[in-house]
Image (cartoon, grey):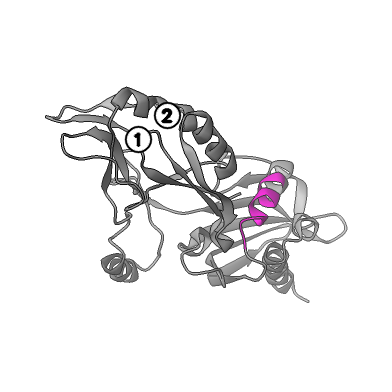
């Protein structure tokens, strides 16, 4: 088998190991002093940090999925080799975060004294648009435009929400106790206290609002808040004066949710991946 064939086979081995969640099989492809530039922080790490990070990620993937690679180029030297390509996960449920974008990888291999090739540098990333701070998810710009037109561009369709309250101080105390949020008073003719806003992000934010004639909505519209463990936040909600409507339950590969009622009578959702 030629050196190029060995490298290509090892790349397939990496994909199969990741997709079968076999961390030992995957890490056997790396040298002990390999430097990792991963798409997930930190900017730079070693093999033990990579092992821990990948094991932590496995729980969020379904039991069956695959890796699709395009534009693979392999270059071979006397004792160093490189490979670069773009790739994505396939076979994940529709809407799963891991299936929404392509990544680019550059991998450097070094020949060992016993003749094996091991990874000494692994770089995985996605480009970004410096004018918008948005990650570019698709290498085909025309495809991106087509997808954007059917999915509200690169941002979620909800741009703003308001939760109507009867007692603003009581409501702020509730959300502060459950999530640790700091609120900002907005300049407005009505009393609005905004949740934290990430101006470069693509999601939604909103505010607690006190408006004459607008009372709590009950369970007419449910807003879901992201959290680390929705079971923990549900207990915090109860301790802060709210009520648990539905305790943590699975929604399959999309994680878990719980439903609680705040101190004002609004039902809100809690979502976590564990």
Up the image or down, 157 lies above or below 32; here it is below
Specify whether residue 60 is painted magenta: yes
Which residue is at 48% across, 69% downward? 94
Q: Viewer-proximal residue, 161 or 65? A: 161
The residue beneath circle 1 is 264
Q: Which residue is mark 2?
A: 174
Quadrant position of residue 139: bottom left
Above-or-below relation of 235 to 258: above
Q: What residue sits 42% from the left and 53% below the top?
A: 127
* Residues at circles 1 and 2 in contact by the CB criterion of under 8 Å: yes
Q: Is residue 80 left or right of residue 170?
A: right
Residue 48 locus on image (x, y percent): 74, 42
Q: Is residue 34 visible?
A: no
For mark 1, give the secondary structure: loop
- Tell me, yes or no, whether the highlighted magenta stretch contains residue 177: no
The CA distance from mark 1 to mark 2 is 9 Å
């Amino acid at each position: 088998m030629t050196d190029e064939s060995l490298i290509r086979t090892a790349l397939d081995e990496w994909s199969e190991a990741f997709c079968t969640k076999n961390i030992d099989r995957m890490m056997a492809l790396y040298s002990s002093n390999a430097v990792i530039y991963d798409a997930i922080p930190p900017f730079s790490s070693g093999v033990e940090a990579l092992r821990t990070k990948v094991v932590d990620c496995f729980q969020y993937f379904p039991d069956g999925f695959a890796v699709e690679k395009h534009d693979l180029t392999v270059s071979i030297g006397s004792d160093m080799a490189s490979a670069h390509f773009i790739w994505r996960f396939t076979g994940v449920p529709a809407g799963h975060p891991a299936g929404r974008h392509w990544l680019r990888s550059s991998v450097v291999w070094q020949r060992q004294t016993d003749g094996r090739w091991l990874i000494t540098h692994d770089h995985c990333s996605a480009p970004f648009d410096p004018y918008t701070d948005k990650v570019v998810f698709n290498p085909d710009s025309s495809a991106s435009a087509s997808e954007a037109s059917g999915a509200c561009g690169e941002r979620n369709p909800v741009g703003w929400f308001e939760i109507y309250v009867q007692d603003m101080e009581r409501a702020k105390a509730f959300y502060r106790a459950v999530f640790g949020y700091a609120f900002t008073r907005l300049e407005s003719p009505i009393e609005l206290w905004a949740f934290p806003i990430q101006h470069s992000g693509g999601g939604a934010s909103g505010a607690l609002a006190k408006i004459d004639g607008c009372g709590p909505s009950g369970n007419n519209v449910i807003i879901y808040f992201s959290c680390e463990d929705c079971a923990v936040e549900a207990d915090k909600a109860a301790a802060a004066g709210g009520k648990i409507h539905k305790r943590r339950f699975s929604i399959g590969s999309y994680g878990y949710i719980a439903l609680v009622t705040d101190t004002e009578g609004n039902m809100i959702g809690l979502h976590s991946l564990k």
